[in-house]
Image (cartoon, coloured by chain):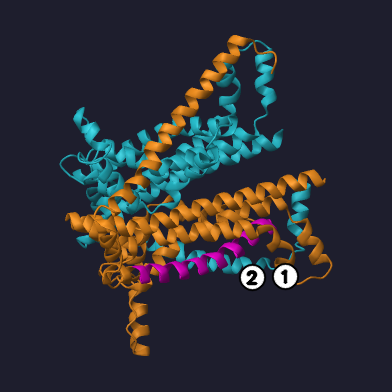
C-alpha cells in the first residue's frame, strides 16, 4: 500500500496529461456523449409515459424472449465451455490446434452472415433442419432457433474465460487429492470446480450480456413473429426506429442499457474479487 | 501417476475419449457445418453466377463503403488504443478502474443501441443537429451524419472502439513499468520511450488488435443498419447481404451467400493469423525461459 502511494506521487514516465486528455476526449466524443443523448431524450418522457411504453405487451414479450433465451443459451455455453476448455487444456489429440483456433470463429464471422446461414441450415429444407423437422422439431423461426444462434455467438466467451484459469491450476492439487483417497469425480467437484467457478461465472455473464442485446445473428432464425413471441428486444428497437417511434425506441433502449450495465458491474466485481484472492496467495 | 491402478487408468481414458468426442461433435455442428453451408449455398448456381453476383453495382458500392468505414475505424481505434493502453498501464490514478470499464462499454451493449445513440445525437431530434445545420449554413456545405456515410463510419468506430486497447493492456501490465521508468530517468523523451522501449513489447498484440478490429469493422451489422438506409449508396457489405437475403428469390439468396463467402474468407484469415501470432509469442516466451 505504501509502495502504491509513493508510485502515485512520483510520475517518472512522461505523457500522463496528454494521454489522459486524448483518451477522455475521444471516449466522450465517440461513446459517452452519443449514449448520453439516449438518456437525455428518454428523461424527457414523463414516468407514466415511460412506464406505458416499456410495459406494452410486445415489448414485455420481447424482453422475456431475449432474457429467457439468453439465460438458456449461456447455461448451455457454460457446460460446453467447461468441457471444451478442459479438453483443450488437459488432453493432447490430433487436430487440437484447429479445434482451439475454431473457437473464435463467432468473433470473426459477421453476425449477419452467421444469421442467414443458421437460418437456412435449420429451416425445414436445409441440413440438419430437415432431419429435425422430420422428428417433429422446428428450429428456424422458433425459440429453439434463437437459443441456437445465441449459443453460436456465446461459446467463445465461456471457453476463453475458463481456459487460462484451468491452465494455471497445478496438477499437484489433483494428485494430492487423489493420494488422499478422493475419487476423481469428487476431486473435480471439490478441488478443481471451485477454482474454476468465478471464471465460469464471468464467461456466463459475458455470454449473457452479449446475448440479451444480440441482433444480427438472431433476427433471421427467429422469424420475428409478434404472435409467436419470437421478437427479441433489439429487433423491437429497430422496428420502432423504422417507424420513427423514437420515444418507444429510447425507452426500451434505456432498459436494455440498464440491464447491460448491471451485468457488466457484476462481472467486474467477480473479476476484482478473483484478482484479490489470487494476490493474497 | 504410477499410483493409478489399472481400473482407474481405464476409467480416466474413457472419460478422455468421451469428452474429446463431445467437443469435436459440438464444434463440428455449431461452427464447421455453417462454414461448409455458406460455401455450398454460394456455389449452388455455378461459378459464373458466383462471380457475376459479386460484381453487381450494389455489391461493389457496398464493398467500397465497407472498406472506407473499416480503414477510418481502424486508424482511429489504433491511435486511441495505444494511447489509452499507455495511460492505463504506465500510470496509477484515481478513476482508473472506472475509465477502463467505460472504454469497454461497446463490448457489452447492443449494437442497435449504438445506432440509436447517433440518431438521437445527430438526427432531426438530436441536440447536435442544430450545430450541424449551422455549420452547413456557414460553410455552404451539405454535411449529413445520420443516414449518410459519416454515420456509418461513426457507428463502425463505436462498435470496434475497445478492440486494440484491450489486446495491448494485458501485455503492458505483465511487462511492468521498470524499463520505461529507467529510460525516462536517463532522459529519454516520451515518444522515444514509446518507440524504443514499449513498442517492441506490444507489436504482436497491437497487430492482433488491429486484425480483430478490422474483422469486426468489416462485419458490423446492427449499428450500421440503424444508420444506413440507401442501398447502393450508404449500404455496407453486411447490409447488402441482408437486402439480398430478405428479397427472398432463390437467385438473390444464392447471391447473398456469395457475398457472405467473401467475409468468411476474411474471418478464416483472421483466425489463421491469430494462431500464427499466438504461436510465435508462445515460442518466444519458451525461448526466453530457456535462456534464463
Q: Residue at x 76, y 59 (%)?
A: A9
Q: Chain of mark 1?
A: B
Q: Secondary structure at mark 1?
A: helix
Q: Secondary structure at mark 2?
A: helix
Disc 2 and disc 1 in contact, CB within 8 angstroms: yes
Q: Chain of mark 2?
A: A
Quadrant (top left/top right/bottom left/bottom right) for the C terminus of chain A: top right
Q: Quadrant of residue A80?
A: top left
Q: Residue at x 41, y 33 (%)?
A: B26
Residue B162 colored in magenta in the image: no
* Highlighted range, magenta: B63-92
- Residue B190 got which mark? 1
Residue B91 colored in magenta in the image: yes
- Residue B275's spot in the image, x, y percent? 56, 49
- Residue lying farthest right? B186
The chain painted cyan is: A
- Residue A18 got which mark? 2
Q: CA distance from mark 2 to mark 1?
A: 10 Å
Quadrant (top left/top right/bottom left/bottom right) for the N terminus of chain A: top right
Q: Main secondary structure of the magenta part?
A: helix
Q: Residue at x 46, y 32 (%)?
A: B23
| Of A4 and B150, the residue lying toward us | B150
The chain painted orange is: B
Amino acid at each position: 500500500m505504501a509502495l502504491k502511494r509513493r508510485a502515485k506521487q512520483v510520475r517518472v514516465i512522461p505523457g500522463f496529461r496528454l494521454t489522459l486528455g486524448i483518451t477522455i476526449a475521444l471516449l466522450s466524443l465517440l461513446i459517452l456523449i452519443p449514449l448520453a443523448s439516449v438518456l437525455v431524450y428518454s428523461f424527457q418522457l414523463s414516468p407514466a409515459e415511460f412506464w406505458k411504453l416499456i410495459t406494452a405487451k410486445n415489448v414485455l414479450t420481447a424482453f422475456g424472449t431475449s432474457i429467457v433465451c439468453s439465460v438458456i443459451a449461456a447455461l448451455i455455453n457454460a457446460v460446453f465451455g467447461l468441457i471444451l476448455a478442459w479438453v483443450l487444456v488437459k488432453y493432447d489429440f490430433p487436430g487440437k490446434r484447429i479445434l482451439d483456433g475454431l473457437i473464435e470463429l463467432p468473433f470473426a464471422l459477421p453476425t449477419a452472415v452467421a444469421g442467414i446461414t443458421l437460418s437456412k441450415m435449420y429451416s425445414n429444407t436445409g441440413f440438419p433442419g430437415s432431419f429435425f423437422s422430420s422428428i417433429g422439431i422446428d428450429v428456424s423461426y422458433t425459440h429453439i432457433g434463437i437459443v441456437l444462434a445465441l449459443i453460436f455467438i456465446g461459446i467463445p466467451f465461456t471457453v476463453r474465460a475458463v481456459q487460462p484459469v484451468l491452465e494455471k491450476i497445478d496438477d499437484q492439487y489433483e494428485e494430492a487429492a487423489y493420494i488422499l483417497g478422493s475419487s476423481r469425480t469428487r476431486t473435480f467437484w471439490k478441488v478443481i470446480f471451485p477454482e474454476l467457478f468465478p471464471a465460469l461465472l464471468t464467461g456466463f455473464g459475458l455470454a449473457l450480456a452479449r446475448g440479451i442485446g444480440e441482433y444480427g445473428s438472431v433476427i433471421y432464425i427467429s422469424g420475428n413473429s409478434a404472435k409467436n413471441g419470437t421478437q427479441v428486444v433489439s429487433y423491437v428497437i429497430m422496428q420502432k426506429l423504422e417507424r420513427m417511434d423514437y420515444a418507444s425506441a429510447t425507452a426500451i433502449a434505456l432498459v436494455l442499457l440498464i440491464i447491460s450495465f448491471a451485468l457488466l458491474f457484476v462481472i467486474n466485481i467477480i473479476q476484482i474479487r478473483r484478482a484479490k484472492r489470487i494476490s493474497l496467495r | 501417476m504410477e499410483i493409478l491402478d489399472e481400473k482407474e487408468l481405464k476409467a480416466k481414458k474413457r472419460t478422455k475419449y468421451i469428452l474429446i468426442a463431445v467437443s469435436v461433435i459440438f464444434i463440428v455442428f455449431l461452427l464447421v457445418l455453417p462454414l461448409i453451408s455458406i460455401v455450398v449455398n454460394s456455389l449452388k448456381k455455378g461459378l459464373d453466377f458466383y462471380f457475376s453476383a459479386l460484381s453487381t453495382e450494389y455489391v461493389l458500392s457496398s464493398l467500397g463503403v465497407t472498406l472506407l468505414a473499416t480503414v477510418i475505424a481502424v486508424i482511429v481505434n489504433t491511435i486511441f488504443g495505444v494511447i489509452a493502453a499507455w495511460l492505463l498501464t504506465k500510470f496509477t490514478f484515481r478513476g482508473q478502474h472506472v475509465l477502463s470499464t467505460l472504454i469497454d462499454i461497446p463490448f457489452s451493449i447492443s449494437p442497435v443501441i449504438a445506432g440509436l445513440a447517433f440518431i438521437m445525437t445527430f438526427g432531426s431530434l438530436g441536440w447536435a443537429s442544430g450545430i450541424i445545420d449551422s455549420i452547413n449554413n456557414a460553410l455552404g456545405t451539405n454535411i449529413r451524419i445520420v443516414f449518410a456515410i459519416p454515420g456509418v463510419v461513426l457507428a463502425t468506430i463505436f462498435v470496434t472502439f475497445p478492440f486494440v486497447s484491450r489486446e495491448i493492456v494485458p501485455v503492458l501490465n505483465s511487462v511492468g513499468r521498470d524499463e520505461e521508468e529507467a529510460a525516462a530517468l536517463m532522459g529519454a523523451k516520451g515518444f522515444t520511450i514509446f518507440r524504443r522501449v514499449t513498442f517492441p513489447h506490444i507489436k504482436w498484440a497491437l497487430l492482433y488488435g488491429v486484425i480483430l478490429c478490422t474483422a469486426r469493422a468489416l462485419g458490423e451489422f446492427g449499428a450500421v443498419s440503424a444508420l444506413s438506409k440507401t442501398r447502393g449508396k450508404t449500404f455496407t457489405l453486411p447490409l447488402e447481404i441482408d437486402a439480398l437475403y430478405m428479397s427472398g428469390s432463390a437467385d438473390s439468396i444464392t447471391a447473398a451467400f456469395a457475398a457472405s463467402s467473401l467475409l468468411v474468407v476474411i474471418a478464416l484469415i483472421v483466425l489463421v493469423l491469430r494462431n500464427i501470432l499466438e504461436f510465435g509469442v508462445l515460442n518466444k516466451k519458451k525461448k526466453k525461459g530457456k535462456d534464463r
